[in-house]
Image (cartoon, grey):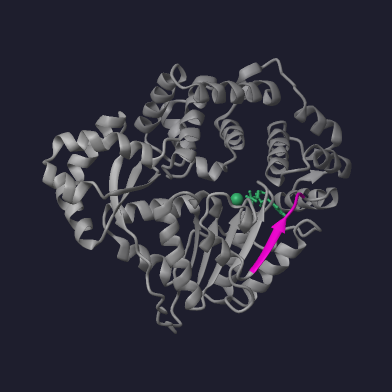
Amino acid sequence: MVSAQVVWSKALPVIQEEVTPITYQTWIKDIRPISIEGEALILMAQNELYLSTLRRFYTTVITDCVNKANNSNYTVSFIIREEEPIVSVPVQNSSEQGVFFGVQSKYTFDTFVIGESNRFAHAAAVAVADNPASAYNPLYIYGGSGLGKTHILHAIGNYVHELHPEFNICFVSSEDFTNDVIAAIKYDTREELRRKYRNLDLLLIDDIQFIGGKEATEMEFFNTFNALHNANKQIVITSDQSPKDLPLLQDRLKTRFSWGITADIKPPDIETRIAILKGKAERDNFNISNDALLYMAEQYSANVRELESCYNRVVLYADFSKRSAIDRAFVETILKDYVSPEGKHMLTPDLIKQVTADYFGITVDDLVSTRRDKRIAVPRHIAMYLCRTLTNTSYPDIGKAFGGKHYSTVMYACDQIATEIGQRPDISTAIDDITNRLTNDFTV
Ligand code: ADP
Ligand code: MG
């Protein structure tokens, strides 16, 4: 990715040609490029006066010149460096219902299987949920992908909400937090942003590694962290690495992450994997033999998400073939390349959604959500395109399968992917790989 510095250094001579020398000297020359966050180029002004002048009078010309010089389509946002004094938020002692957003009710401690690999993280999470802001603050959980970090984070949220319905609780991914910060800068709604995040009793922030290198977001998070911590409010953070190993994050944040307790999660052992599968089968009321469970657990050792999607596939096919009992032979067949005489006909939007989501490491819920960040929107468009090309599903029905979207949205997505296949190797590779998986692994 190009850096803000490079983008800005190309823009400067173009701006210089557009504005008078005195304007350039006074207002432009000391602007500091900070970062590129989403579609936004973030620039820093010296102080409030510069900030308001740049915003009012120079945003358009600067934006035009930046994009002309870089052949790009950035929006330009200005910030100033704020080291906010640490002031406590007044404690609100109300018995009313608190705000409760972002937490998914399906992830609870009840459905979380404890094993050696996650025992400590689980215990720390329960301790924090039982005594918010008095056990460990912050709680920092880290580990590889698909090992249950997000699950635990939601579980803490659900548990605390049940014990303290009056608490303000928020679960947010780092990407959504970044988007909130960018929007607040762009629309000048910093106050709202602060109200949202600083009146919380419990902030659950997922995958903090993604804010690394996004300076405006880091600054806002730093200030949010200080405000909450100082007001004795609980913060729980997850990440793919330990605080000290986070490559892009500022040291002052890393230090703060180690103030409370740090717990890692490792890949589960075979007993835990079997127990996870058993739990799911029981909840879904599926009769799966022990050796079938063992066989599945043996295939996927490093990632519970993959183990789950294997389980989902098996269950999906058991449903298709109206089987009530699943044995090892059936599972082996499903997990091997197995092609039926009917060929393509068994491909359904559900299966395509599942496989596409797995491929991109997101959830089917993400895929059918209304989220617009690229990480989710591109897979969604690809999945829609595959539904259109691999099944006989109509545009309106595809729209329905993706959370009730309008058929024109689906048409637009399909057109876009069809165009991009010829231009973007990443997209054509993804489509080939997913199609291969669908036709080799799943067609019965
Ligand atoms: P991460 O955030 O670490 O990438 P997730 O929390 O999203 O992983 O977990 C991936 C999937 O695996 C989720 O559906 C989650 O419910 C499940 N999972 C992970 N660990 C466990 C566990 N110990 N018990 C039950 N389910 C688990
Ligand atoms: Mg996660």
74 relative to 444 in the view: left or right: left
Q: Nearer the viewer, residue 175 or 126?
A: 175
Q: Position of residue 235 (x, y in %)?
A: 54, 68
Q: Position of residue 138 (x, y in %)?
A: 58, 69
The answer to whether residue 111 of the structure is visible from this angle is no
Of residues 233 and 106, the one drawn nearer to the viewer in this rendering: 233
Picture layout, residue 332 above or below residue 304:
above
**Magenta stretch secondary structure, dominant:** strand
The answer to whether 397 appears left or right of 345 in the picture is: left
> In the image, residue 317 lies at what x, y percent?
70, 33
Residue sitting at x 55%, y 51%: 209
Question: Residue 411 appears in which quarter of the rendering?
Answer: top left
Is residue 139 depicted above or below 346 in this figure? below
The reply to whether residue 181 is in sight is yes
Residue 372 horizontal/vertical position (percent): 41, 42
| Image: magenta residue range | 261-267
